[in-house]
């Protein structure tokens, strides 16, 4: 998770809540962060292509898990709504970045 998510009390509560109630989503968010971290380390052209596919797959999976989570919005209490909103605030930029990586031009074509 990002430093702003780790550094706040709400971030800690959100991580704990996700881990307890939505372990698949928590794992996919950590996996996506690892993909993005690896992408930032100047991968080889072959790794670049593999990371693009991994990012596209992670984006799709997280989108589905977030849609399932959002379906509970109407029946959620005030605390759970805050946790859902905090999850969305964290996931939105991560999803945007995954989409950027998934559609990035391959280094093979630029060399």
Image (cartoon, rainbow, N blue to C red):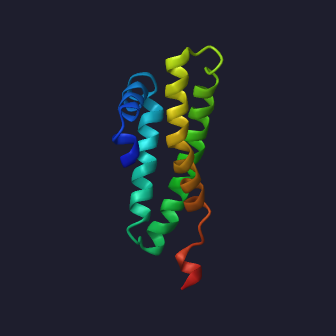
The image quadrant where one finds the N terminus is top left
At 42% from the left edge and 50% from the top edge, which residue is drawn?
A: 33
Across and down, in percent, residue 66 comes to: 58, 33
Across and down, in percent, residue 19 comes to: 39, 28
Q: Is residue 103 above or below residue 57?
A: below
At 54% from the left edge and 56% from the top edge, which residue is drawn?
A: 97
- Which is more toward the observer, 79 or 52? 79
Across and down, in percent, residue 78 comes to: 54, 17
Q: Is residue 78 above or below residue 98?
A: above
Residue 69 found in image quarter: top right
Q: Is residue 62 above or below residue 72?
A: below
Across and down, in percent, residue 98 comes to: 54, 54
The image quadrant where one finds the C terminus is bottom right
At 43% from the left edge and 35% from the top edge, which residue is drawn?
A: 26
At 46% from the left edge and 40% from the top edge, which residue is drawn?
A: 28
Residue 8 found in image quarter: top left
Seen from this angle, which residue lies furthest bottom? 111
- Which is more toward the observer, 40 or 78? 78
Relative placement, left or right, of 109 versus 5 is right
Relative placement, left or right, of 8 versus 61 is left
Number of marks in the rendered image: 0
Relative placement, left or right, of 49 versus 43 is right
């Amino acid at each position: 998770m990002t430093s702003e998510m780790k550094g706040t009390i709400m971030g800690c509560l959100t991580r704990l809540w996700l881990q307890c109630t939505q372990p698949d989503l928590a794992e996919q968010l950590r996996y996506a962060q690892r993909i993005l971290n690896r992408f930032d380390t100047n991968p080889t052209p072959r790794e670049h292509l593999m990371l693009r596919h991994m990012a596209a797959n992670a984006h799709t999976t997280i989108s589905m898990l977030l849609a399932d989570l959002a379906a509970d919005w109407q029946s959620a209490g005030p605390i759970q709504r805050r946790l859902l909103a905090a999850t969305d605030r964290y996931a939105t930029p991560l999803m945007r970045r995954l989409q950027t990586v998934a559609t990035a031009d391959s280094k093979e074509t630029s060399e």
